[in-house]
Structures are given as structure tokens and as C-alpha cells.
Image: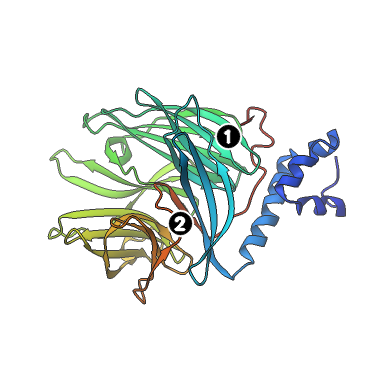
Amino acid sequence: MMSQHLPEYDILTRLPVKSIFRFRCVSKSWNSIFTNPIFITAHFNFNLAKSLSNNSHNGFLLYTHKISYNIKELRTVICNSDHTLTHVSSFQIPSFEFHIHNRVIGFCKGLFCLTSYMGNSYWKIYLWNPSIRKITIAGTTNNNALSNVTLGFAYHPQNNDFKILRLVSYPCKKKAPAEVQVYTLSTASWRRFVIPDSLSVSSIWVISESPSLFFNGALHFLALIGTQNDIFNRFILTFDVDEERFHEIMLPPNYLSEKYVRHTKCLTVFKGLLALIVFNCETEQTDICHIWVMREYGVVESWTKISVPIEGVARFFGCTVKGELVMGKRSPSQIFSFDPESLNEEILAIPAAKDVIYTDYFAESLNLLDRLNAKDY
């Protein structure tokens, strides 16, 4: 095994993913290096540092694009400072047994967590590294009319591992406890959690189907519970990935206004802080966007609000590092960015897509190369 302190080892960590994937065939010793978790982490950290050192752009957009009836692509573009886009890569998304109804659950360190609809309310959960064309099946989940299934995907830095959280609640059964399972990539297995009755999560009715937010070492979800008097309480449910414990964060008081006919709520990171985005619809075309920012994590009193007018928002996808909101229009169907300070709006030259992810960095990785259960596609 080549020492991590030799110059040759450092050179190998700087090679592109495609080159490393080809060079595995050079010898057994080289393949042993490339599939070592320590090397995989060192290689990613080098690419990550390289990506973060480039301050000439405004992050990356990853989105799905339908090529034909049974072919979808995952495309990555750079968001340039002048709001133009530069193409980085395109990868065909795997489909199973001719089912192409894929959903992107999350993205961490070059790995995507996706689900693929298999019919009869069953979804297959899998992890995918498009850079090395590897997938591993994590399991299946049943999302029927009687249950509400929410998934979250996160990286566990303390163990250099990945985890999938599955939360199942039963809106039609008010007294039925929520079910919790965690999948760990290193063991390729699920573990069931017993939730203490003292936690509100044990009596959750509904968890938001919008993508979970991985921030500050925890997955964040918008949750709804009902009291014995049928009074609804909404809060942010967090799951600490390292401790594997649930916590609750109270939402801002009076964050919903009764005078508006429709509300859309999303969690995001706004300039490095936890934020709640609330769109209050006044008319079919005019919205008011409230950006609630938690200035001190976990401190309810630190919520502050920024309110701006905006028109025709259909979906919210995230915030850039500079604080611009990335969203989808209702009509015409377009992806655009919005600066809440200047109120400037810029149309982004990508097709309207159901799955759009914004990330401030993007680096290819070798994750899954060391997993014996990962398959080529």
C-alpha cells in the first residue's frame, strides 16, 4: 500500500475522477489505493478545496431534464456572476424496470439519493454516483394514501459515512406513532428507532414533503402535530446525524397571516443562517415573500423577518451564497433568481424542471467505489 506521505500519493489525489476510474486496471495495488476510504476522502477534499477557492461564480445548479419518454438526464451548470450559465456535465439517470418517475431526495459529497417509482405505491431508494456510474440499492418504501413518508439524506463526517432517514407518519390515524428508520451506507442496513413519548415527533401527523434541509450537522423538516384539543402546532423537526437524536425548533410567532389565501413554506440556508421562506399569495399573480432568518441557531427569539413583493412563484429551490432566491415561475414556466435587496430578477437559461438543487460548491467524488454492493449501470 502506498504511503499517504509519499509525493506519488499526493499526485494521485489530484487526478480527475475519470482518470482514476481508468487507472484502476493498471495493477491490483493501484486499485487497492483508489478504493481505500482514506484515499477517497483525500481526493474529494482536494477537489472541494479547489471548488471553494474559485470565487468568480455564484455556485452551481443541478437539475433534471427529460430527453425522451424513458430517458432523463442530470445536468450541472455553473452560475456565473453575470447570471449566465456554464455547462459542467450531463449524466443519464438510471431507471429500473422501465419506471422513470425519479425524485431527487438529496445530494452530499458527489452522491445523490433518489427514489424510483415501482408501481403499487412502492418506491425504490438508491444512492447514485454519476461520476463513476455506480449505484447501490438502499431499499424500498411504501407511500400510500394512509401514510406520509419523508426521506432525508446526510453525510456523517465523524464516521465518514452517509445516512438516509425515513420518517413515516399517519395523518389519518391521529394516535398512531410515527415510525423512524435509519440506513447507514457502511453497513448497508436499516435500523428501527423507538421514539420516546416525551418527544412531539412521536405524535406527528404530517411532515412536509418538500426536500429536507441538511444544515449544522442535522436534517431539518417542517412538521405538524395535533394536540388533544385538535389544535395544530407547527415546528421544525431536526435529526442530529451524529447523535441520532431528534430535537425541536419553534417557528417564528405569527409567521402565517390569516388574510392570505395560500401559503407556501420552505426551509433553506440564507447567507449561512437557518431560514424559513414563506410565500403569502394575495392574488393569482402577486405574492409576498417573507424571509425569516434565525440569527442564532436554536434561539427562537433570534428570528428576524425580511418581506419583499414578488410575482408568480410556483416553486422555491434554494438560496445562493450571495442571498439570491432561486425559484420557478408559474407562468411562463421558467427558472429565475431574485435579489431581495435590489429586487432584481434574472431569468436563468435552463429548462423548467421539477428537481432543481442549488449548491455553493460542486466536486466529483469516488464515493461508492469502495462498496462491494455498488453496481455499474
Measured along the vertical axis of the image, is residue 119 above or below residue 183? above
Q: Position of residue 333 (x, y in %)?
A: 33, 55
Residue placed furthest toward the bottom? 342
Residue designated by label 2:
350
CB atoms of marks 1 and 2 within 8 Å:
no
Which residue is at 17% across, 62% downward?
282
**Residue 267 spot, x, y in % from top left:** 36, 54
Q: Amino acid at mark 1?
A: Leu
The quadrant of the image that shows the N terminus is top right
| The quadrant where residue 2 appears | top right
Q: Which residue is mark 1?
A: 185
Q: Is residue 254 visible?
A: no
Q: Quadrant of the C terminus?
A: top right
Rounded to the nearest angstrom, the CA distance separating label 1 from label 2 is 33 Å
Residue 298: percent from the left, percent from the top? 38, 58
**Residue drawn at x 52%, y 45% as measured from the top left:** 74
**Which residue is at the far front?**
68
The picture quadrant where one finds residue 197 is top left
Is label 1 in a helix, a strand or a loop?
Answer: loop
Does residue 69 sit above or below 223 in this rendering? above
Nearer the observer, 230 or 113: 113
The kind of residue on which mark 2 rests is Ile
Residue at 43%, 53% (x, y): give it: 351
